[in-house]
C-alpha cells in the first residue's frame, strides 16, 4: 500500500499566512492527524505533496517515514498525485488522502482498502449530504453502479440535485494511475487536472468502481475556513471526552474540556469545567482537577487535588498533594507525598519532599526542600544574581517565617527557624533561631505631614 497525502493548497478562506495544513486541531497541525491515519494503514510508502508555504510544511512535520514532494505550480489534484507517482511502488495500490481532512478514522480507511479487492479495483469514499453544494457529485447508473464524478461547477441541474458527494479519498491500482494521470485534461471550469476524472476512465476500461461510506460524514469533512476548523475541533474534543467517560473518568461538562495531547487517567478521576491538557499527562487514582486548570506534560499522584485556576507545566506531583488555587508549577518541579502548594505560590526547578507546605504568596526556585518544612507567606528564594542561577537548600523540619528572602546559595539547617522578615545571606545553623531585621523604633510626638493649602 502507498499513501499520497495532498497538502499543497493555500487555503485562501482561512485568511492566514500560515499554510492551511499547519493550522492546529487539538494542538497539532491538521496534517499530523492525517499522517497518523496513514501510518495506521501499515502503508509501505507515505508521500506528502506540498506546495503553498514552501519548506515550512516539511520543516514543521519532519519525519523519517515520509517522502516530501513539491508541487509547483499547483495545477489540481490529478497533477499533484502525478508528482508523487515516481516515488510509489507500482505493484501495490495507492490511497489518496487530504492534509486538511483530519478526522478520518483508521477503521474507515481499512474498509475502503478492503473494498479494492487487494488493489485490483478502484474504491471511492463517498458521503450523503443534506446540502451538497460545492461538492463533486457521484453519478450512478440505474443499477447503482458508479459512472463518474462531476464537479459542482461543471454539473447540470439534475446532477446538482444528487446528494451523494465525492470526498476525494480513494484507493486506486498504482499501475492504472500511471496510465491515467498523464492523460488527464483540464477542460473544466477551473482549468485544473482533476483526479476525479480517473473514475470515468476506469468505467470506460471496464474496471469496477466501488463506493464506501464512513459511519459519520464529519470523518471526510475538510477545513477551508476558521469556522470549519472550529467545528471540527468541537467534534474531536467531544469524541475525546466520550472516550474518557467510557474509561470511567468523571467530567463536570463534556463540552468544556480540551485535550491537546495524551491524557491517561486512573480510576475515580474527576475533572471540572474548562480544563486544558497538553502533551502527555498521567493522572493517578482518585485525583480531582478543579475548574480552569492548565496542565502540560505532568504526572499527578493518586489522591491529589489540583484546585481552580492552577497552571502545571512539566511537573511531577506526588500522591495526596494539594495544589492551588491559583498555583503555578513550572518545569523541573518535583513534589513528594502530601505536599501543599497554596494560592499564588510559584515553584520552579525545585524538589519539595513529603509533608512540606508553602501555602501563600511565595516563590520557590532552584531549591531542595526537605520533609515537614513550613514556608511562610511572602517567602522568596533569590536564586538569580543577574548572570547565574544558584541553589537554596532547606533541610528537614525547618520553619521559614513570613516575608523571608533566601539569597542563594544558602542552606537552612535541619530544624532551623527563620524569623519573619529575615533576609538570609549566610547559612542558618540547625535547631536554632536566625533573625535578620531592623530594630523596631517608636518616635513619640511625631506628626504626620499635612498638605499645604
Image (spheres, helix red, strand yellow):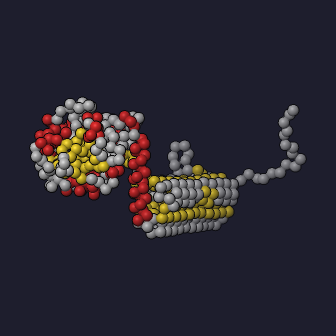
Task: Report if residue 41 is visible in the image.
Answer: no
Query: Which residue is nearer to you in this view: 51 or 444?
Result: 51
**In this view, which residue lies farthest toward the right?**
445
Query: Which residue is nearer to you in this view: 361 or 30?
Result: 30
Residue 134, given in percent of the width and then of the height, sits at: 32, 39
Residue at left offset 17%, top offset 53%? 116
Residue at left offset 47%, top offset 69%? 268
Q: In the picture, residue 41 is in which quadrant?
A: bottom left
Q: In the picture, residue 151 is in which quadrant?
A: top left
Query: Which residue is nearer to you in this view: 198 or 386?
Result: 198
- Image: 243 above or below 33: below
Q: Which quadrant holds the C terminus?
A: top right
Could you tell me how many numbered marks the image carries? 0
Q: Is residue 152 left or right of residue 176?
A: right
- Image: 59 above or below 295: above
Residue at left offset 26%, top offset 45%? 166
Task: Report if residue 216 is visible in the image.
Answer: yes
Q: Is residue 440 left or right of residue 230?
A: right
Residue 314, given in percent of the width and then of the height, sits at: 46, 55
Residue 3, given in percent of the width and then of the height, sits at: 22, 48
Residue at left offset 37%, top offset 34%? 12
Query: Which residue is nearer to you in this view: 369 or 306?
Result: 306
Residue 198, given in percent of the width and then of the height, sits at: 17, 41
Amino acid at each position: 500500500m502507498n499513501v499520497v497525502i495532498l497538502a499543497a493548497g493555500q487555503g485562501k478562506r482561512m485568511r492566514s499566512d500560515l499554510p492551511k495544513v499547519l493550522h492546529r486541531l487539538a494542538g497539532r497541525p491538521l496534517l499530523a492527524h492525517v499522517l497518523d491515519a496513514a501510518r495506521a494503514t501499515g502503508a509501505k510508502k507515505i508521500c506528502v505533496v506540498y506546495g503553498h508555504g514552501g519548506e515550512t510544511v516539511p520543516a514543521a512535520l519532519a519525519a523519517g517515514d515520509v517522502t516530501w514532494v513539491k508541487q509547483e505550480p499547483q495545477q489540481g489534484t490529478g497533477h499533484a498525485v502525478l508528482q508523487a507517482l515516481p516515488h510509489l511502488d507500482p505493484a501495490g495500490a495507492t490511497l489518496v488522502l487530504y492534509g486538511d481532512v483530519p478526522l478520518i478514522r483508521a477503521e474507515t480507511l481499512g474498509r475502503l482498502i478492503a473494498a479494492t479487492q487487494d488493489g485490483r479495483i478502484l474504491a471511492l469514499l463517498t458521503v450523503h449530504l443534506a446540502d451538497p453544494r460545492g461538492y463533486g457529485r457521484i453519478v450512478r447508473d440505474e443499477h447503482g453502479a458508479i459512472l463518474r464524478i462531476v464537479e459542482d461547477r461543471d454539473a447540470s441541474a439534475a446532477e446538482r440535485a444528487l446528494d451523494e458527494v465525492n470526498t476525494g479519498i480513494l484507493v486506486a491500482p498504482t499501475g492504472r494511475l500511471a496510465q491515467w494521470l498523464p492523460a488527464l485534461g483540464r477542460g473544466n471550469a477551473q482549468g485544473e487536472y482533476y483526479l476525479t476524472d480517473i473514475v470515468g476512465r476506469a468505467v470506460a476500461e471496464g474496471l469496477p468502481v466501488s463506493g464506501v461510506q464512513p459511519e459519520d460524514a464529519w470523518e471526510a469533512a475538510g477545513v477551508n475556513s476558521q469556522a470549519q476548523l472550529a467545528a471540527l475541533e468541537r467534534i474531536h474534543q467531544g469524541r475525546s471526552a466520550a472516550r474518557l467517560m467510557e474509561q470511567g473518568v468523571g467530567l463536570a461538562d463534556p463540552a468544556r474540556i480540551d485535550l491537546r495531547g495524551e491524557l491517561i487517567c486512573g480510576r475515580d478521576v474527576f475533572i471540572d469545567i474548562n480544563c486544558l491538557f497538553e502533551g502527555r499527562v498521567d493522572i493517578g487514582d482518585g485525583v480531582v482537577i478543579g475548574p480552569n486548570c492548565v496542565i502540560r506534560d505532568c504526572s499527578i499522584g493518586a489522591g491529589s487535588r489540583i484546585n481552580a485556576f492552577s497552571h502545571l507545566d512539566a511537573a511531577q506531583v506526588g500522591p495526596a498533594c494539594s495544589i492551588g488555587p491559583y498555583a503555578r508549577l513550572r518545569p523541573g518541579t518535583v513534589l513528594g507525598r502530601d505536599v501543599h502548594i497554596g494560592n499564588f505560590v510559584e515553584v520552579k526547578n525545585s524538589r519539595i519532599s513529603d509533608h512540606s507546605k508553602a501555602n501563600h504568596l511565595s516563590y520557590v526556585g532552584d531549591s531542595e526542600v526537605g520533609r515537614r518544612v513550613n514556608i511562610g507567606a511572602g517567602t522568596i528564594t533569590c536564586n538569580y544574581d543577574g548572570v547565574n542561577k544558584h541553589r537554596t537548600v532547606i533541610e528537614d523540619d525547618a520553619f521559614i517565617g513570613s516575608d523571608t528572602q533566601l539569597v542563594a546559595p544558602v542552606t537552612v539547617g535541619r530544624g532551623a527557624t527563620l524569623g519573619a522578615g529575615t533576609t538570609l545571606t549566610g547559612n542558618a545553623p540547625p535547631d536554632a533561631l536566625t533573625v535578620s531585621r531592623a530594630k523596631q523604633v517608636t518616635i513619640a510626638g511625631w506628626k504626620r505631614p499635612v498638605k499645604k493649602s
